[in-house]
Amino acid sequence: MVRFTAILKKFATQGEKTGWTYIEIPEAIAIKLLPGKKTSFRVKGKLDELRIDQVALLPMGGGDFIMPINAAMRKGIGKRQGAGISVILEADNSAFQFSEDFMACLNDDPAAMNYFKSLPMSHQKYFSKWIDSAKSIETKTKRITMAIKALAQKKGYGEMLREQKQQKN
């Protein structure tokens, strides 16, 4: 386990990372988490008092990593770019738990399940995390329905969201 203080930063222009809020994980700290690891890996711990699990550290070269801080995490810590945060991290080797409700519904639609299984694990997780982030049962039900329909039509997570956005406009 490692403890350190970090500053919330934001990429101005950095390709696909443009606009991301993140913290830096220097090589000296990353080595303490997983010695010799040069590729992305998951951590758990705390950002201030916010508990985190299964959060990815992304390599930035030279042994340094970053941890993207998404909107839910920023809201949870109540801080923005430039603020300091207390960080406690350890490697998280636990298996990802898919949404039970989502998986039960996927099992009822073989076409959707087959396409879902063909997606990379990270893309499968996008669907599950999005569904589990719903604050009400109504929203969760709506998201499961959208996901099953999109997967049955062989659409990925991004395609599904873009299509939904277009329908609203």
Image (cartoon, rainbow, N blue to C red):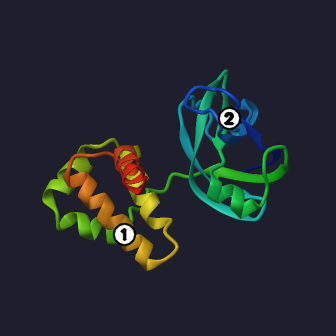
**Nearer to me, 33 or 19:** 19
**Can you say whether 22 is above or below 114 in the image?**
above
The kind of residue tagged 2 is Ile
Secondary structure beneath dot 1 equals: helix
Circle 2 residue: 31
Secondary structure beneath dot 2 equals: helix
**Nearer to me, 130 or 34:** 130
The kind of residue tagged 1 is Lys
Q: Which residue is pictured at 66% across the width and 33% down the height?
A: 65
126 left or right of 109? right
In the rendered image, residue 103, in percent from the top left (x then y), is placed at 29, 65
Circle 1 residue: 142
Q: Which residue is pictured at 27% across the width and 46% down the height?
A: 155
Callout 1–callout 2 Cβ contact below 8 Å:
no
Q: Which residue is pictured at 38% across the width and 62% down the height?
A: 98
In the rendered image, residue 100, in percent from the top left (x then y), is placed at 35, 70
125 left or right of 67? left
